[in-house]
Every structure is written in structure tokens, then in C-alpha cells.
Image (tube, grey):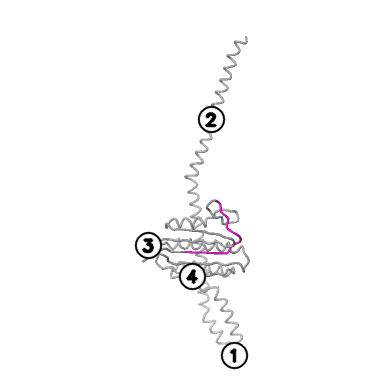
Amino acid sequence: MKRLSEPIHLNKCYIGRERSMKELSVILIALGVIVLCNLVLWLCILPKLVDKKIARFQNDLVNRHYDEVETMYRKMRGWRHDYHNHIQVLKVHMGMGQYHEATEYLEHLEKDLTTVDTVIKTGNVMVDAILNSKLAMMKERNIRVDVTAIVPQSISISGIDLSVLIGNLLDNAMEACMQLKEEERFLRIYMDILKKQLYISVTNSMDGTAKKKGNLFLTNKDGEHGFGLLRIDSIVAKYHGYINRQTESGVFATEVMLPLTGIS
């Protein structure tokens, strides 16, 4: 009886092993399908979603820049509209010998005018618009600014790309400055044409040093490489340019160089 039971026992073991192998094969195939689906999602679908999100971010940014510039010029038009009224008021004060009142009125006008004055004229209308709107915001936020900017009117970089690039650079710089006390806030901006390239340098104060994840700098409180930096990088890559970011205690600096065509 024992001899007859051994083949039956061996047969059951063989069937059990075969069933386990089939189950293992099914599991491996299922894992392979999951990995393949994730790979397709990563290579095909995810980049499109990121591109759409970046495009939406750029559109929102351009609209915000447009609103900022429109607000600034609306204030300018309003001040110019009231110019004759201001002159009449001053004439009345002077005619009545009210020199103290006239002086106070002029001081009030000076403060009001600083909110609409176009501080910088670079030579490029688009750069003037975005730069002056950001400078007005910096003044409101009590950020000390040093600016030197020369940009030709006709350059081989689209106005939209230039606006997004400069706007993002300055938005990031202001965001870092606002983490500090008023007396510690400063921002330096330099733009010029160097060796047939548009050179842009933005240096700002910050709290400590910027954090990095691999080769990427982290910009927001969640420690993410924000869409602003991604947009800057993509524009620089689009024009086959160069970007360099440096940080040390209390300071962050960004340099951008974009090759230009048609510049002698």
C-alpha cells in the first residue's frame, strides 16, 4: 500500500508546483502590464499634462503682467488728466500768499507722482512696460532697487517671451525679499547687450541660502521647483541661451544670456 501511495503523492506535488508556477506567471504578467502602463503614462501622457499646466501658467502670468502695466498707465493718464487742476490750485495758493499751503500741496503731488512715474527707459517698449510695473510694486513693498537697463527696440526675442522671462525673474526675487525685514530688502537689475547677446542679471537678498534638489533650485514653501523657474529655463533653452544661478548666505543671483541675431 505504501508503494502505491507514493506516485499519487508525487503527482499531487507536481500539480501543486505547476499551479504555483502558473499563479506566479500571472502575477509577473500583471506587474509587467502595470509597469508598462506607468511607462506609457510617464512618457506620453504626463509631459502633455505638464505642458498644458505650464501653458496655463504662462497665460495667467501674461494676463497678470498686462493688468499690472495697465494699472500703472491708467494711473499716469489719471494724473495727467488732473494736471491742469493741480496748476489752478497752486496758482490760487500763490496768488493769496499761501506759500506754506502751496509747498504742502506740491509735496503731496510729489508723493502721488512717484506711484505712477516711469522710472526706467531701456529703449524697448515691452521691457519698459514690464520693468516699470515691477519697479512700482517693489517701491510699494519697500524693496531697495538698483537698476541699469539698455535693451534695443528691435531684437530677435518675442515680446511675450521677454515679458514672461523678466516677469518671472523679478517675481521670484521679490518673493525672496519679502521674507526679510524692510531694511534688509534689496534687488539689483542689470540688462545690456554684450557680445551680440542679451545679458540679464538679477541679484536679490534672501533669508539664508536657497535649497536645491539635485541640480534644481527650490523656490516655494513646499520645496518644489516652481513653474516660474521651469518657464524661465524653457525660454532660455528655446533661444539656445545660457543660465546660471548662484546662492550664498543672504544672496541669490541669476544670470541669463540669450543670443541675438541682426545685432552688429
Q: Residues within 10 Å of mark 2 (few under 14, many from 20)?
A: few
Mark 4 and mark 3: Cα distance apart in space: 23 Å
Q: Which residue is mark 4?
A: 148
* Label whose residue precedes the other's in the sequence (4 or 2): 2
Q: Which residue is mark 2?
A: 26
Q: Residues within 10 Å of mark 3 (few under 14, many from 20)?
A: few
Between tags 4 and 1, which lies in front?
4
Residue 208 is drawn in which quadrant?
A: bottom right
Between tags 1 and 3, which lies in front?
3
Between tags 4 and 2, which lies in front?
4
Can residue 33 be found in the magenta stretch? no
Q: Which residue is mark 3?
A: 261
Mark 4 and mark 2: Cα distance apart in space: 67 Å
Examine the rendered structure and indicate whether residue 5 appears above or below residue 129. Answer: above
Question: Residue sitting at 57 percent across and 90 percent down?
Answer: 95
> Label 3 is placed on what type of residue?
Thr
> Label 2 is placed on what type of residue?
Val
Between tags 2 and 1, which lies in front?
2
Mark 3 and mark 2: Cα distance apart in space: 60 Å
> Label 1 is placed on what type of residue?
Gly
For the residues bearing labels 3 and 2, Cβ distance under 8 angstroms: no
Examine the rendered structure and indicate whether residue 238 appears above or below residue 2. Answer: below
Q: What is the magenta range? A: 200-213
The quarter of the picture where the C terminus appears is bottom left
Instruction: Check disc 2 and report its element: helix, strand or loop.
Output: helix
Mark 1 and mark 3: Cα distance apart in space: 61 Å
| Residue 80 on image: x %, y % | 50, 77
State left or right for residue 235 relative to residue 16: left
* Label whose residue precedes the other's in the sequence (1 or 3): 1
Return the mark for residue 97.
1
Q: Residues within 10 Å of mark 1 (few under 14, many from 20)?
A: few
* Label whose residue precedes the other's in the sequence (4 or 1): 1
